[in-house]
Image (cartoon, helix red, strand yellow):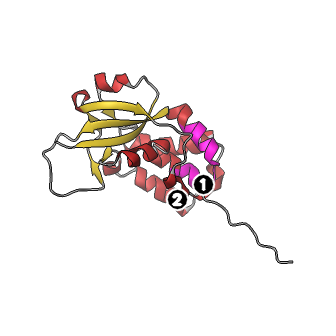
Amino acid sequence: MRTLYRGVRLTEPPDTLKRYGMRYYWRGTDDAVSAIFEALERTHSISKLGRTPLLRMLVTEAARPKRIQIWGTEVKENAQSYARGTPELIFLTLDAAKVPLDVRRRFIEQYYGKPYVVEFTDGKHQSKLRAINEACGNFIEAERIISVEPVEVNTPDPYMKFFSSSMPRPESSQEG
């Protein structure tokens, strides 16, 4: 068996996962789609996306049953970065609506909790093929969870530069 890592947000104490296991944020696609609209409404951003192709794409992604599952990675640093912006459907929706990064982070922390990395076994035999991320279903049993560690959000995250409002803006050059 391999060890995998998952970046998560928790509203309950971390040892709860070691007692009851880890479930994906939403039980199904309807919950995921509802969460997108709730995030837009609560951040007063729904008018920024309206009936755009981008919003349709995000809703379509949330409506895919295979999307609503736990993914694990063999690289702990990837999970630490992921924990900062998870649930990603909400983070990406708010990013697309140009919600400032600090507002996104506060919203996600308020509704989904603080970021953690969960270390767990994949429950399968070692494979010669390595995937960057591996789908693990929508529930990880408590006995497979090895540890749950907090993620420090005040340290720089190199992956954040890929999001629109997090990218440095070029300074205008003035010739004179």
Tell me the SS state at disc 1: helix
Q: Quadrant of residue 6?
A: top left
* Magenta highlight on residue 93: yes
Q: CA distance from mark 2 to mark 1?
A: 7 Å
Question: Which residue in the structure is indicated by mark 2?
Answer: 162
Q: In the rendered view, would you say 139 is above or below 50? A: above
Q: Are marks 2 and 1 in contact (CB under 8 Å)?
A: yes
Question: Which residue in the structure is indicated by mark 1?
Answer: 166
Please state the horizontal and vertical placement of residue 53, each as a whole percent of the image: 53, 63
Can you name the residue that lies furthest to the left here?
A: 125
Q: In the rendered view, would you say 31 is above or below 58? A: above
Q: Is residue 130 left or right of residue 110?
A: left
Along the line of sight, the residue nearer the viewer: 19 or 89: 19
Task: Please indicate, yes or no, whether residue 117 appears anywhere in the rendered image.
Answer: yes
Please state the horizontal and vertical placement of residue 126, each as a whole percent of the image: 14, 48
Tell me the SS state at disc 2: helix
Along the line of sight, the residue nearer the viewer: 20 or 114: 114
Name the residue rendered at 39%, 26% in the picture: 14
Extent of the magenta region: 92-108
Name the residue rendered at 55%, 40% in the picture: 38
Name the residue rendered at 22%, 28% in the picture: 143
Neighbour tally class for label 2: few under 14, some 14-19, many 20 plus, Cα within 10 Å: few
Q: Amino acid at mark 1?
A: Ser
Please state the horizontal and vertical placement of residue 158, each as a whole percent of the image: 50, 54
